[in-house]
Every structure is written in structure tokens, then in C-alpha cells.
Image (cartoon, rainbow, N blue to C red):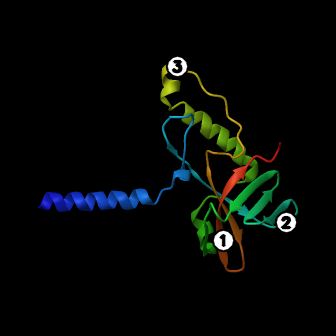
Amino acid sequence: MKKKICLIILLTINFIINAQKKESDYFTFYKGGGKYLKPLKYVLFIPKEGNVKTEEGRKKIFKIGSERFVFDKDKHKVDTSSVRFLNNIKLEKTTKLRDNEVVFYKNEIKKTEIYKKSGFSYPFPITKVHPYFKIYLLEKTDMKLIKYEVDWEYSDF
């Protein structure tokens, strides 16, 4: 009886932990390959020259320098927190985000089975959305911080 109760408790805890993660929290390098958890990156949006926020239907588009971030109300979540949250995280600069993504890609691809067997490294892919980081865009208001989960899109094409 004790074994059954312990097993039920263990399965319940495992279910709760895994329920926190979504499919969009993971990426794969190739079709049928293993899933890897995306690292979290935080970008601060400050409205100024070169930084623009626009709305197109149910989407909010944030342009920071040459980078474009899209918040889709149907696909993403929005959250609020206190401004003190900024003390607990590391903010990323959009100018360094691409370089960090390439370095991350090169380091992670070397850990895959295909690379270990053949030594062949896939070239860095270009898709519509940067798939390797989970980006949260932070917008500071008077007394709170609005945290948007966004897609980071290529905007140089």
C-alpha cells in the first residue's frame, strides 16, 4: 500500500513539473532529433528614437534598433511584475543577441549525436523566427513591469 501511495505522489509531482513547460520551450536541430530547452533571454524595451511599438490587429510589434519582436495575443502570454524583478535577471542587448545565438548554436550542435559520429556541423540556419532562445520583452511603466513572451523575427531581409 505504501508503495502505491509513493508511486502516485511521485507521478503527480512529475506531472506538475512537466506541465509547466510548453512545446514552444524546446527546439530541435533537425527533424527527428532530440529536444533541447531554450535558454531564457530578457530584453528591455525603452521607447526612444529607433525603438518603436506598433499594433496590427491582435499583434504588437516591437522594433528595437534593427531587431523585430512580435507579441501575438493568440499565441503568447503577457505577465506583470514589480520593477524589482529587474534586479534578479540579466538583460540582453539586442546588438549582442545575434552573436550570442550563433555561439550558443555552435556549442550545442557539437553535443548532438550526428556531430559526435561524423564531425559534421550543420551551418547556422536562417528561418523566419530565431528558434534558439525564448525571449521575454520587458516594458517598464510607472510602477510595474509588463513582461511579453515574444517571437524574435529576422528583420534584415
Q: Residue furthest right?
A: 49
Please name whichever residue, 57 or 2, is drawn nearer the observer in this view of the structure.
57
Dot in front, 2 or 3 = 3
- Image quadrant where residue 102 sits: top right
Residue 106 at x, y = what percent?
A: 61, 33
**Pointer 2 and pointer 1: residues touching (CB < 8 Å)?**
no
**What's the residue type where badge 2 is placed?**
Lys
Q: Quadrant of the N terminus?
A: bottom left
CA distance separating discs 2 and 3:
48 Å
Instruction: Name the residue tied to disc 1.
Output: 146
Sequence-wise first label, 3 or 1: 3
Q: Residue furthest top?
A: 118
Sequence-wise first label, 2 or 3: 2
Residue 50 at x, y = what percent?
A: 86, 59
Residue 124 at x, y = what percent?
A: 67, 33
Please name whichever residue, 60 or 50, is drawn nearer the observer in this view of the structure.
60
Q: Please name the residue shown 76% across and 46% down the image.
A: 154
Above or below residue 108? Residue 122 is: above
Q: Residue furthest left?
A: 1
Above or below residue 95? Residue 56 is: below
**What's the residue type where badge 1 is placed?**
Ile
Element at badge 2?
loop
Badge 3 crowding class, 10 Å Cα cut-off, few under 14, some 14 to 19, many 20 or more, is few
Side (left or right) of 132 relative to 139: left
Residue 48 tag number: 2
CA distance separating discs 2 and 1:
17 Å
Element at badge 3?
helix
